[in-house]
Image: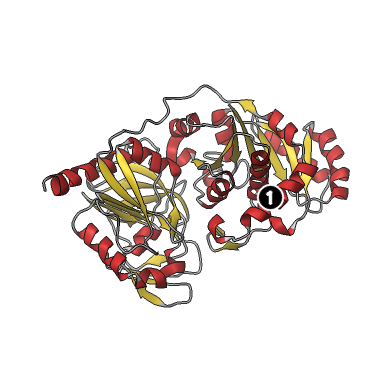
Amino acid sequence: MKRLMLAAMHSGSGKTTVSCALLAALRRRGAPVQAFKCGPDYIDPMFHTRILDVPSRNLDLFLQGEAGVRRTLAGQSRAFALVEGAMGFYDGLGGTHSASAWQVAHTANIPAVLVLRPQGSSLTLAAQVRGLLSFRTPSHIAGLLLNRCTPMLYHHLAPILERETALPVLGYLPPMEEAVLESRHLGLLTAGEIADLSARIDAVAARMEQTADISGLLALAEEASPQAGPLPLFPTSPRCKIAVARDEAFCFLYEDNLDLLRESGAELLFFSPLRDRRIPAGTDGLYLTGGYPELHAEVLSQNTSMLQSVRQAVEEGVPTVAECGGFLYLQKTLEDAAGTVWPMAGVLAGSGFRTSRLQRFGYLTLTAQADSLLLRRGETLPAHEFHYWDCTENGAALSAQKAGRETSWRCGFTSPSLYAAFPHLHFGGRLPLARRFADSAAQWRKEHRCAH
C-alpha cells in the first residue's frame, strides 16, 4: 500500500481541484485508489467519494489523536491512497503545527507534493518553497505541482524551482473554467449540488494527463507503515437499529462514525428528513447529522409527519445524537437564508437564526457537567464547530473551551438519551462514543421492543 499527500502553502491554491483531477485520472487508469482528507472538513470528502465511489475518510489529529488517525489509515483497502491536506501545510492549532497537514504527514510518514499557484513571482516562489523545506525536519515535501499556470509560465518556472529547491516539478494544470467550483457560506457547494461535476472533473483530469507527470507522482508515494491494529469487524447479528439522517439537508458526517457504530453492533437505517414521511420502522437510536437545514427550511417544515415522528421519538427517550444542523432541526423554529422563519421539530425551545459571520468557529474541548448519553461527568472531548447560523437557546450542559485560547462558554442539551449541540463529534477518538450510543440504543430496544 502506498500513500501520497497533496498540500499547499495556503488555502485557495486549488488542492481540492487538483486532488479530484488526480483521483479521476487514476480511476481512468483503473488504479485501485481511495482518498483521505486532513482536518474536520466534510465537503471535500464528498467530492472524493463522488469521483471514486469509495468513501473518503478524515484524518484529524485533534479529534482522533494519533492512535485514531493510524487506525483510520490501517483500514486502507486500496493499493494507493491520496491524502488531501488542509489550509497551509504547517497551519495547525493556535499558530502551531499541531493537527496540521504536516503533522499528519509526519505521524504516518506520508510524502507530500506542494500544489503551488504562482501569482506574480518567480524566484521568490522558490525562496518560499525553500523556507517550507527548512521549517521543520523532516519536511516530508517530495515534489511540486503548479496550478492555474499557463504553459509559458510553467516552462519558465519549472527549471528555476528545480534548480533552487532540488525538488522535482511534476507538471501543471492550466487555468480552466471546468476547474472553478462554486462556493457558499461554509465553503464549496457539495458534490451533489453540482449537476455537471463528473464532466467538469473528467475534463480537468484529461488535461492533467497531458500536462502533469502522473507516473512521477505515483513514484513519489511511499509504502505505508505496518497496520496499527485490526481492521473493523462488523457483527453478523446487529443488536440495535440506528436511523441516520442523510440527504441534501443533512450531509455532514464522518464515514468513520458510521463504521464505528456498525462495529458496536448497530444496523444503520438511512433516511431523508426532506422526503421520507417518518423515521424508519424499528428505530432504536436517532442520529441527526450536520448539514444545511437552513437552506431547506421550508421543505423540512412542510414535512410535518417527519417532524412529528422525530419529536415523538426523542420525547419517548429514543437515544438521539443531534449535532449542528441536527441541533437546529430539533429547535422550535429555523430562519432560512431569506429571513423567513419556519417551524421545526420543537423538541427544544430555541429559534435558529442567521448571522453575518462564523460563530465559535474551530476546534474546542467539551467537558461534561453530568452523566449523559455520550459523556460521563468530568470527561473531556475534542470537538469542532463551523456554522453561520446560531440559536437563541444553546443549552448549558457542557463547558466548551476554545482550543489554544482562553475563550470558553456553555452549550448543549444532554440527558441519558440525548446529545444535542452545535459541536460536531468524531467517534474515533479515545472515548467510546459509538459504543455508548449503540449500548443505549440496544437497551432501549430491549426495554421497548423485545418486551412486546
What residue is pinned by disc 1?
202
Q: What element carries label 1?
A: helix
Task: Please give the name of the residue rendered at 46% of the width and 25% of the height, measured from the top-left corner.
Answer: 228
Q: 96 above or below 282?
A: above
- Pick the front one: 134 or 426: 426
Whether residue 330 is visible here, answered yes or no, is yes
Relative horizontal placement of residue 342, taking residue 124 as reference (left or right): left
**Residue 378 shows up from this direction:** no
Q: Which residue is drawn at 41% across and 47% down?
A: 383
* Residue 211, image x, y percentages: 80, 43
Q: Within 10 angstroms of label 1, few (less than 14), some, or many (20 or more) residues?
A: many
Pinpoint residue 176: horizontal percent, then vertical percent. 75, 56
Q: Position of residue 371 (x, y in %)?
A: 22, 45
Q: Position of residue 202 (x, y in %)?
A: 68, 50
Colour option used: secondary structure
Residue in the picture at 64% in, 36% down: 30
Residue at coordinates 44% horizontally, 43% vertically from top-left?
Answer: 255
The residue closer to the viewer here, 411 or 350, is 350
